[in-house]
Amino acid sequence: MNKIKKILVALGSVFCLVLFGSTAFSQGSSGDFPEISVGAISQPMGWSSYEASWLIGHRVGTTNMGDLGQISSLVIDKTNGRVALVVLSDVPNIGGEVLAIPYSSITNIGANGCDFNPGSMEIVTGEGAGYPYGDPTVYALTSYPSWSKFYGFPSEMDAAWLTEIYKHYGQVPYWTEEGEQSPTSLELYDSHRLMGAEVRLSAGEAAGRINDFVIDSSDGRIAFLVLSDVPGRPTTLVAVPFGILSADGGDTFVLNTSQEHLALARDFDESGDLNNSRWAGDVYRYFGQQPYWTEKMEMAPPSEGMME
């Protein structure tokens, strides 16, 4: 009898430990760790984002407190859904031309400014060189002749030009990452074309205008378009996944959704939704899209332990 009691006590102790441990873990996870799960409800860890209108206007400086200019627009890679380049105006020494640099060339983005990241670009810093503007980085980026191909925009922005820009500024092209489209035929355009553009639905009905777009700060992916003037919702903003947008060849863009679906989409509130990963996932799933932050997780092969 005593033996049976001991067995029952031992089993009860194990049960309590399992129950207590699982409860403590779930409480700790919700407060101290970012949420993440597997499959369709997976959430990005540490996800943060900002609106393009907030980034435009930032000044770009160097580690030596030099000033490279102000971000005036962005070059959008529609093929891969990313900000490919940031465009600087008010750049010293290049005669009013703009300077397009890779998105990965900006770092430490703060409230009003950010830093230039030279990547593998060689910046000569020898003593007594007498750099104009007192900064070797500013000199390295602006010392080419005024007709240099690295200033302004070519007559046609294409993959070859984008590749050369990344190479010149010492940045690893994002399209070398697994799953990205190779730069043979990229659809590139200036963000000025996107902001304020009229949007229509697949069936031709008006869907409003592009008010802004939301950028994933980790890699420059465009997570959402923010729409205004949506029919029936004149006072609210609506976010839709960037992937449902296509261009019609002119100045009008098309959303691959229906009027009924758009009418019931969730409102966008920048004060509460920008860094809300659960809200972001819900928006993607509402429009029938796979959240891009789950794609690599699902493509990854199972570990040896999982295959057993």
Image (cartoon, rainbow, N blue to C red):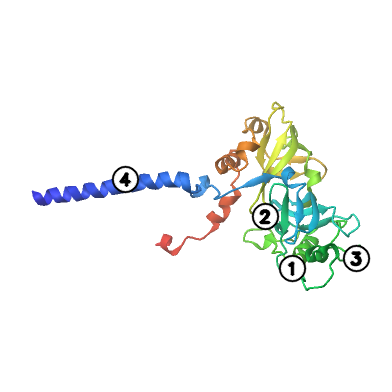
Label 2 belongs to which residue?
Answer: 108
Q: Of label 2 and label 1, which has the lower sequence position?
A: 2
Label 4 belongs to which residue?
Answer: 19
Question: Label 4 is placed on what type of residue?
Answer: Leu
Question: Label 3 is placed on what type of residue?
Answer: Pro
Q: Does dot 3 land on a helix, a strand or a loop?
A: loop
Q: Does dot 1 land on a helix, a strand or a loop?
A: loop
Q: Residues within 10 Å of mark 2 (few under 14, many from 20)?
A: few
Q: Of label 2 and label 4, which has the lower sequence position?
A: 4
277 sits left or right of 76 in the view: left
Cα–Cα span, label 2 and label 4: 44 Å
Label 3 belongs to which residue?
Answer: 145
The residue depicted at 57 percent of the width and 39 percent of the height is 279
Q: Of label 4 and label 1, which has the lower sequence position?
A: 4
Q: Does dot 4 land on a helix, a strand or a loop?
A: helix
Q: Does dot 2 land on a helix, a strand or a loop?
A: loop
